[in-house]
Amino acid sequence: MKKALLFVMTAFILSGCMNSKEEFSEEQLRQKAESSNVHAESNDQKGIYTNNPQAPDTRSLRKIGQEYRDEDGKVILKAISDYHETHMIGPIELTISNVKVMDYTPAHHLIDFFHDFTHNETNFTYVKFHITLNNTSEERVNFAPISVLETNEGEIKDFEDDFYLQNLHGTLSANGRKSGELAYILDKTGPDKLTEITITTSDVFDENNESIQKGSKIEIAF
């Protein structure tokens, strides 16, 4: 199902060593945006929360061990970071907050969806981020807030591994804004071993597919 949802996306091209990935192109980011089926909050949707169909709402979970259950399954808060920072990456104002690690048991109707994301589709750990993007320029740009994610245990995820599919990677219109969530399953890093996550953004690309700002590395501690 993952391949069906993301059939227009192109994979990272490996260069040098196995863990070295090339930057997104403008075309890759545009395709990522067009293929997503859940849209992030835009300028005309400020303040409206849209529940993600892939997982329960975790906003009420603030203390370790708290759980929440709905028609999508059950989540338990395993770790939380107090990280809430804004970064300027060229014209992009990127804010990252509400970083949580969840234990998730999906409802039966969602298990097939997770087959291509993990071999432990009936119960797994994932990390989620709340992302807000503001394009401060007068030109359309393309950008991916999380191009590569790496845990302190060396587990690596890329943009295709996000299962929330909220259209946060890709085109951002002139003076445009997006807000939503990204989520990545962690198969090799248990909550008890997770102390830090390093994310690498993509470059910022203009309408001519030219990089106008190199990406940044951001470290988030738990």
Image (cartoon, helix red, strand yellow):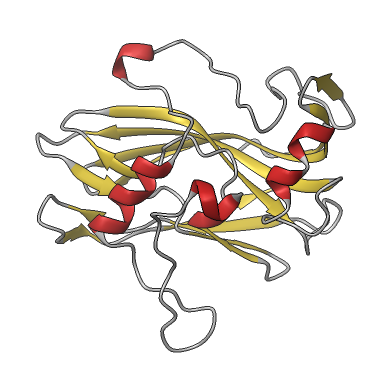
Q: How many marks?
A: 0
Residue 141 is situated, as x and y percent measured from the top left of the image, at: 20, 45
Q: Residue at x 15, y 40 (%)?
A: 140
Does 213 appear above or below 43? below
Report if residue 76 is visible in the image: no
Q: Residue 179 occupies which quadrant of the picture?
A: top left
Quarter location, residue 82:
top right
Q: Residue furthest right?
A: 65
The residue closer to the viewer here, 152 or 202, is 202
| Residue 36 position (above or below residue 4) | above
Percent position of residue 56, x then y:
72, 25
Residue projecting furthest to the bottom:
16
Q: Who's the residue at 73% across and 68% down the image?
A: 153
Expressed as whole percent of the image width and height from the top left, the position of residue 110 reads 74, 36
Q: Residue at x 73, y 53 (%)?
A: 115
Q: Is residue 182 left or right of residue 185?
A: left
Taking depth in this image into account, of 117 and 154 the one nearest to the observer is 117
- Residue 41 spot, x, y in % from top left: 41, 22
Taking the image as shown, residue 39 lies to the left or right of residue 50, namely: left
